[in-house]
Image: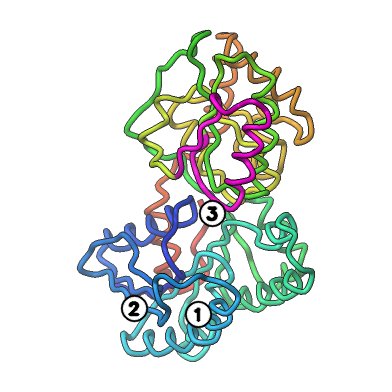
Amino acid sequence: MATILTCYYRPKPGGFCKRLFRAIDALLDQGHTVHYLAIIPFPIQHDHCHFHRFPWPDTWPNGLFFWAWFHLLAPLYLLVIGTRIRCTHLFAFASTYALLLKPLQAIRRLPLSVFIRADPLVNHELAGRKPWLIKLERTLEYLSLINTRCYAVSQSLASTIIRRHNFSQKINIRVFPNDLPTLAITTTRQATPTSVHLACVGILEPRKNIELVLHAVALTPASIVLDIYGTGPDLPHLSVMADRLNLANRAFFHGWIQGNQFWEHIDLLLMPSKHEGAPNAVLEALAAGIPVLASDIPEHREVLPADCLLQLDEPQFWTSKIISVIYDNQTRSIILSKQLEHAARFRFDWNEMITKIITCRNNDTQSA
């Protein structure tokens, strides 16, 4: 059995950590041992899962000084830990954490699998970060992906990274998508004129583009409400905007809630993102039998049929499409059927595949 090392600074809500923890659970279920470096423990209880604390107070903010400290010390800690436990395999979610594992990989000649789940450069641009930070991120990404086994969550993301660095001959980036989950519920809810619930799910930040949904919902009948599941830096701004659009009694911010607690109450999922890595919420909605309307971006095109995709700058068109899907049972049925047919290729054993990828000793492991 393998002894595996990974790292991530601290657990937080969202699809990133959900998949990271699922990968660790999959490895543990197959009898492997997992060690990880973090500030606080992951929510995983298992005799073969071992937490190694990074020296940073739990209550201190994770600002610029923290990231400088983390990038300076984490590679040394990982080198010591990996040597002491006689680590056999390494893996990381995101190139940032792969870079921290590179000294250990080089010295001990260990296989390193990197799962790239979003494009940090695009996220930085959408967040208005400084150009020097984006250039630095690009350089660090390049260094982190050399001599690693790279798996992007979508074909569009893989193609973007290859074009950005023009190193397709040096590194083979394969595609390892998210799977269509098995949920405990499959909704049979029917929208009625007096009870319609739309939803947005995910971290509240500029790239999620929740503003567009608020403008679209403001033009719909008063019986339609919007449930927003998630939190993030855009929450105060979105709350003010909802009040300004007279949505105080129609837009509800619920914070982070597990999907199995709200999908059965939702009639339609809205995903107006400007950029996505892996749209977990879309796959969960499809698995629960809920129709989805999403922005027409490359990541959504890989998951949804064309007639479910809408332009990013036309809230009136979103309003029209929402009303059509909600109140026309035939339209709703056709969209659901097309979506499920389109998503059929995402039915595979994700746990088994990621375990094979991480524990493989060579580069022969194929993507899903």
User: How many marks do you count on the picture?
Assistant: 3
- 164 vs 252: above or below: below
Residue in front for this viewpoint, 167 or 218: 218
- Looking at this rendering, what residue extends furthest in the left direction? 47
Q: Under tag 2, what secondary structure?
A: strand
Residue corresponding to mark 3: 176
Query: Any mark on residue 71, and which?
Result: none
Task: Give the side of residue 353 with respect to residue 280, left or right.
Answer: left
Q: CA distance from mark 2 to mark 3?
A: 28 Å
Could you tell me which residue is drawn at 53 percent across and 67 percent down?
A: 114
Can see residue 259? yes
Q: Indicate which disc, 1 or 2, sits on the residue closer to the N terminus.
A: 2
Could you tell me which residue is drawn at 55 percent across and 9 percent down?
A: 329
Residue in front for this viewpoint, 331 or 266: 266
Residue corresponding to mark 2: 52
Residue corresponding to mark 1: 101
Q: Nearer the viewer, mark 2 or mark 3?
A: 2
Number of residues whose C-alpha sits closer than 10 Å to that of mark 3, classed few (under 14), some (14–19) or many (20 or more): many
Residue 21: image x %, image y %? Answer: 38, 58
Q: Is residue 106 magenta?
A: no
Q: CA distance from mark 1 to mark 3?
A: 21 Å
Which segment did they paint magenta?
Answer: 228-255
